[in-house]
Image (cartoon, grey):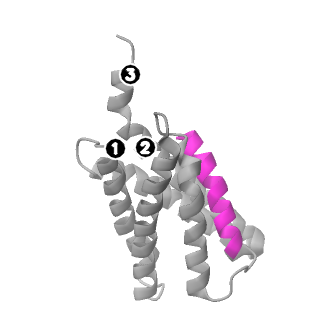
Amino acid sequence: MLQGGVSFGVVSLLAYSIWAFRLIPGTAAMYATIAAVYIGLSGVALGRLVLGPGAIPRFALLFATAFFVYAAVWCAFWFGLKGKHHADLYGAAVGLWAMTWMLRRAFDCQGGVLPSLAVLFALHTVGYTLGDDLYALVRGSGGRLLWGAAHGVGFGLGLGYVVYECQQPLRDRLRPK
């Protein structure tokens, strides 16, 4: 989980720097570019958590797909509800459900999605909310970067948990008896 938190926190910091330094004009273009940074870098950063040879490129493709779905759902809620009525919360809940389902399915994880989703959603939401609070305190580019780091660490801790949990049967089979 710690490796997931740190590595995803770094990727998130890079992604949020686009917003922090206003590198891309236009809201939709900015969100698309941020999503592209996450899609391009997160799978490689988190792929080190996956057991087995050649895991990083396979996981990078899986994660890119799962994150694209999450981002599309989040944006649909955010833009659809015009940023009101807890749009970010509903977008995260539905998007994270889709992401969790895709990751669990890819790893052939047994059992329901809900326990993994609960951990991922809780850690993601804590990171996002802490980041929002830090941004309210600091404001400006520094506040935006703090939001990105906090959101990324929380999200990464949750993702690290899901990936670890899904690989438990494999670790059990590899453990010497």
| Precedes in sequence: disc 1 or disc 3 | 1
For the image, the number of numbered tags is 3
Asked if one can make out residue 158 in the rendered structure from this viewpoint, the answer is no
Q: Is residue 148 visible?
A: yes
- The picture places residue 65, in percent across and down from the top left corner, at 42, 62
31 sits left or right of 84 in the view: right
Counting residues from the start of the chain, the first of labels 2 and 3 encountered is 2
Secondary structure under the numbered disc 3 in the rendered image? helix
Up the image or down, 109 lies above or below 41; here it is above
Residue depicted at 58% across the width and 41% down the height: 3
Using the rendered view, name the quadrant where residue 99 is placed: bottom left
The range drawn in magenta is: 1-18
Could you say whether the residue bearing mark 1 is in a helix, strand or loop? loop
Left or right: 72 as drawn, with respect to 149: left
Label 2 residue SS: helix
| Quarter of the image where one finds residue 70 | bottom left
Q: Are marks 2 and 1 in contact (CB under 8 Å)?
A: yes
Question: According to the image, label 1 marks what residue?
Answer: 107
Residue that appears at 33% across and 56% down: 102
Residue located beneath label 3 in the image? 174
| Marks 2 and 3 close (CB-CB < 8 Å) | no
Q: Residue furthest left?
A: 111
Q: Is residue 14 magenta?
A: yes
Nearest the viewer among 137 and 117 is 117
Q: Is residue 80 left or right of residue 138?
A: left
Residue in view at x 40 percent, y 81 percent: 76
Q: Amino acid at mark 3?
A: Leu
Give coordinates of residue 89: x percent, y percent.
Answer: 43, 71
Residue, disc 2: 163
